[in-house]
Image: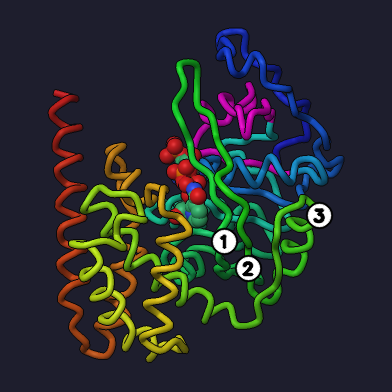
Amino acid sequence: MKEPPSLPVAPSPLVAPSPSQAHAEARSGAVARPATGRFPLAIIGPGALGLHFAARVDGIAPVALIARDAAGAARLNAGVEVGGHIFHPNAFAAERAPEADWVIVLVKAGDTAAAASTAARMRPLGVLSLQNGLTGELLRAHCAARHVDQGITTEGAYREQGDHGERVHPAGAGETLVPPGFEAVAELLGRAGLRARVEPDIAHARLAKLLVNVAINPLAALFRVPNGALLDPPHRVLLDTLVREALPVLHAHGLELDEAAAIARVHAVARATAANRASMLQDLLAGRRTEIDAITGALLRMAARTGTELPTHRAVEVLVRALESRNAERTDRVGC
Ligand SMILES: NC(=O)c1ccc[n+]([C@@H]2O[C@H](COP(=O)([O-])OP(=O)(O)OC[C@H]3O[C@@H](n4cnc5c(N)ncnc54)[C@H](OP(=O)(O)O)[C@@H]3O)[C@@H](O)[C@H]2O)c1
């Protein structure tokens, strides 16, 4: 059943604004809900990137923000600080998600199947993942919209827990590349001031991003260092080994980068993001599940199809999963 259009929920009096919220300029309701109840755009996953995108698009078109559950939606509707402004989104619980023309999926990779099922119920023209790792197949398995595909983004944002709630900080403007068929999404993001364009060879762009991710993300997590430290001994030899080992597999799937160019690209990203903590490191430190399966796991599955062994990537995957399990055990003990 379609949720009838209704007024945004008023901020809850039970949630006291943080000092920074109190001083933050309120920014909400710039564009009301659509009269038809069908949104031009919806974003599933109200985390760092989802809130960053939603807050930007909100100024120019109605955007539905889909949370895991009713409590999450209510928290968001009460107002959330994004980039120093209080943002009151049109937030919905997944089970009450409205119809939408286009849906962007921005949950962590491990939550893709649930998000895809939600997207399917929204009767969209297209569903676009901007997640890291490879999630397109999983999305298509759970959602049969006309266009279901994965783009890439180098936009950045991170969440921070304040005394009185969560804040989202945009962390550097990047570029969003979407597959052909998603022209309307690129246009909408562009009008919102985000750099976005259709990339005809999106498969190549995804492989190039996967190369960077399989090298930097798990190593930064295992060594607990910011990205830039991977360029120095003793990490650099492993960084370069991961690139060299991944290349033949990625070449077989269409990546056109020779070894020198591939290593240069990974080094350039590590340098450009030298002070950043990779998302996998942030996830491990916060006791969350990482995206290792959609990143290194995806590469290992590609390699397995041609019987190729990637021993260093296999070792890295085992180590990251071991750290995840240790986190999970700790959480279990706390719960006892
Ligand atoms: N952040 C960045 O700078 C960045 C840059 C490029 C790409 N990416 C990619 O973008 C994706 C999202 O990253 P992020 O940093 O925004 O993650 P995040 O902050 O962890 O946000 C994910 C959000 O999705 C929610 N969620 C989980 N399952 C859901 C479901 N079934 N329905 C609705 N919402 C659900 C989570 O809720 P809970 O909190 O309740 O779990 C959380 O609010 C990842 O694949 C990441 O690799 C991120």
Callout 1: few (<14), some (14-19), or many (20+) C-alpha neighbours within 10 Å?
Answer: many
Q: Is residue 60 visible?
A: yes
Q: Nearer the viewer, residue 181 or 227?
A: 227
Q: Which corner quadrant of the image does residue 305 belong to?
A: bottom left
- The part of the chain drawn in magenta is 63-88
Q: What amino acid type is highlighted by mark number 3?
A: Arg
Q: Which residue is mark 1?
A: 153
Q: Sequence order check: which comes first, mark 2 or mark 3?
A: 2
Mark 3 lies on a secondary structure that is helix
Q: Which residue is mark 2?
A: 177
Rounded to the nearest angstrom, the CA distance separating label 3 from label 1 is: 16 Å
Callout 3: few (<14), some (14-19), or many (20+) C-alpha neighbours within 10 Å?
Answer: some
Q: Which residue is mark 3?
A: 191
197 left or right of 289 in image: right
Q: Nearer the viewer, residue 243 or 80?
A: 243
Q: Position of residue 97 (x, y in %)?
A: 62, 43
Quarter holding the C terminus?
top left
Residue 86 on the magenta segment: yes
Callout 2: few (<14), some (14-19), or many (20+) C-alpha neighbours within 10 Å?
Answer: many
* Contact flag, marks 1 and 2 (Cβ < 8 Å): yes
User: Which residue is drawn at the image coordinates 45% and 86% (left, top)?
Assistant: 255
User: Which residue is drawn at the image coordinates 55% and 35% (left, top)?
Assistant: 168
Rounded to the nearest angstrom, the CA distance separating label 2 from label 3 is: 15 Å
Q: What amino acid type is highlighted by mark number 1?
A: Thr
